[in-house]
Amino acid sequence: MIESSNKREPYEVELGRITIAAAEMLAKDMDEVFQELTHRGAITRLSPRFQAAEAANRTVVLCRTLVEEIRRYEHTRWWDEHRDDDLPF
């Protein structure tokens, strides 16, 4: 079997990067929708525009939370791989 000279990242890291990119793009688009809906004028809680703005805002929050969680996982994984186990504490 021929070994590749390119060392690939583990699959979960590559998947995490793809997921981060997709979530950031979706969050950006939904934030623009939210801003547009809320800046058009006064909206009431019962209006369809309010419901659409609320859904867009929830999507933004979920995407940003997902990105933060993936980055936290990557940081923890990196730290676990590079910490010095010879420390006395």
Image (cartoon, rainbow, N blue to C red):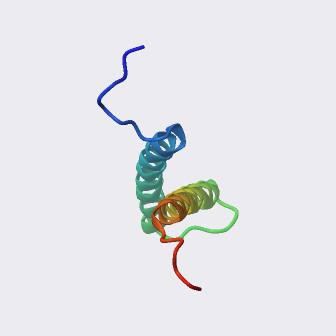
Q: How far across and how far down the image is residue 38, in percent?
A: 48, 66
Left or right, residue 79 beside residue 5: right
The front one of 89 and 82 is 89
The front one of 39 and 9 is 9
Q: Residue furthest top?
A: 1
Q: Residue furthest left?
A: 5
Q: Is residue 87 above or below residue 18?
A: below
- Residue drawn at x 52%, y 80% is 87
The front one of 45 and 75 is 75
- Picture mark count: 0
The front one of 45 and 34 is 34
Q: Is residue 83 above or below residue 22?
A: below
Q: How far across and how far down the image is residue 31, in percent?
A: 45, 59
Q: How far across and how far down the image is residue 89, in percent?
A: 59, 86
Q: How far across and how far down the image is residue 1, in percent?
A: 42, 13
- Residue drawn at x 45%, y 54% is 33
Q: Residue furthest bottom?
A: 89
